[in-house]
Amino acid sequence: MSRAVDSPRVLNIADLRRLAKRRLPRAVFDYIDGGADAELTLRENCRVFDDVTFRPRNAVAIPRCDLRVSVLGSRLELPLLLGPVGSSRMFYPRGEEAAAHAAGAAGTAYVLSTLSGCRLEDVKAASSGPVWYQLYLVGGRDVGTAAIERARTAGFSALVVTIDTAVSGLRERDVRNGTKELLSGHPWTMLPFLPQFLARPRWLAGFLSDGGLMAFPNVVLPGEGPMAYADVAAALEQSTASWPDLRWIREVWKGPLVIKGVLTGDDARRALDEGAGAIVVSNHGGRQLDGVSATLRALPEVVTAANGQAEILLDGGIRRGSDIAKALCLGARAVLAGRAYAYGLGAGGEAGVARAIQILRADLVRILKLLGCASVAELDRSYLDVPSAWVADAPRRTSVGAG
Ligand code: GLV
């Protein structure tokens, strides 16, 4: 582990965030850190974990904790996957490969975003663990079909379809930082926004040595080749997946399907009808529709609706192992972290990602021991006090398949 991200300098995810802010240009840091509109949901995703409190079983000796979990048939060493984060190659040279390598080394899965800078084959090869492909329909159906076929050939083990991008959320920080102007290609338009990059020479050296502005090598446009980098607002605009798309996607991809972006029981039931093996309770990290529920609050309704017919995962607001434990107590099989590891990547590349995973893992072991619970498979509602309004839709943990 690199000393730069070691204890006591880095004790928690907030420390990695601080280091990422110091190393990255403002536009890149804010792309990771920011959310949509007033960032209500972004904040609420984190805050809501304070609303539920633990009920420990004390005087219980737990010499060893079992963190292992099976997700879509893969055995993971801990109930934490690295979720899809677009443009990771802007955070650190070959960022997606670095993050996938760290995930594999920790015995967990990495989910590659369509809007990534590294070739999907290289990302798969970088990890010794499972890698999933997250599909956006940017470029259209034929481009999506070709990407799915490439992902299958490369050995990706699940396809994730994100359903909350009818348009892009308004990420005000990105607008203010000149993301659009910086990609205009017109020097005079770009000029006012360039000093933020010159202020981060270490990042700039890495960025230039990695080839400068990334393209999207997994979005191959017929007759054109890899799609040029576009700001995320423009890319998401063309990325919408609707329920009818699930039909043809199902014909092209026969493997495990994950539907990400579910916040209601109705959408959960629809996802089951479309053949989802796993559902991610997600509001896109507060980056899309601002003002929706925090994901932890939406989780019980989705767990009830899925009724054990799909594995339930959750993303949004995961900054500590206690957050993972609370989500599992409320019925999630595992969680996905996005920003938590992206801060690590921005702070120190693969070492930063590895440190983020190590922090969350150590937290989780400590929390289990303090709860008097020997394994993540045993976490359930009885370890939590939940606000009474949540109780109606918060059943005891449902088990799906092998745990
Ligand atoms: C990409 O999916 C983003 O939310 O920026």
Image: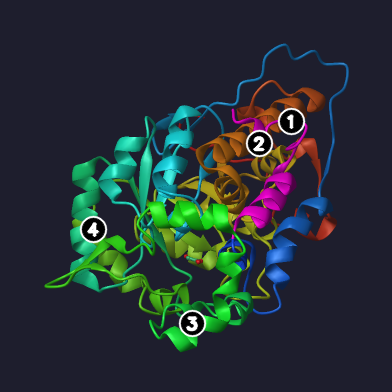
Query: Residue 34: image x %, image y %?
Result: 64, 67
Q: Considering only order in the chain, which callout, 1 or 4, is on the residue closer to the N terminus?
A: 1
Q: From this view, report whether residue 30 is shown above or below residue 254.
A: below
Q: Is residue 79 left or right of residue 373?
A: left
Residue shown at 65%/30% (left/top)? 3
Identify which residue is drawn at 52% across, 67% down: 266
**Residue 364 position within the rendered picture, expressed as x and y whole percent measured from the top left:** 69, 31
Give the residue pinned by disc 3: 190
Left or right: 154, with 348 as reference point: left
Sequence-first tag of 3 and 2? 2
Q: Amino acid at mark 1?
A: Ser
* Nearer mark to the viewer, of 3 and 1: 3
Mark 3 neighbour density, 10 Å: few (under 14) some (14–19) many (20 or more): some
Front label number (2 vs 4):
2
Q: Is mark 1 within 8 Å of ligand 1?
A: no
**x, y percent for residue 183:** 42, 78
Image position of 45 (left or right of 225): right
Q: Which residues are magenta?
A: 1-24
Q: Kindly tell me whether residue 392 is visible in this rendering.
A: no
Dot 4: within a 10 Å radius of its alpha carbon, few (fewer than 14), some, or many (20 or more) residues? Answer: many
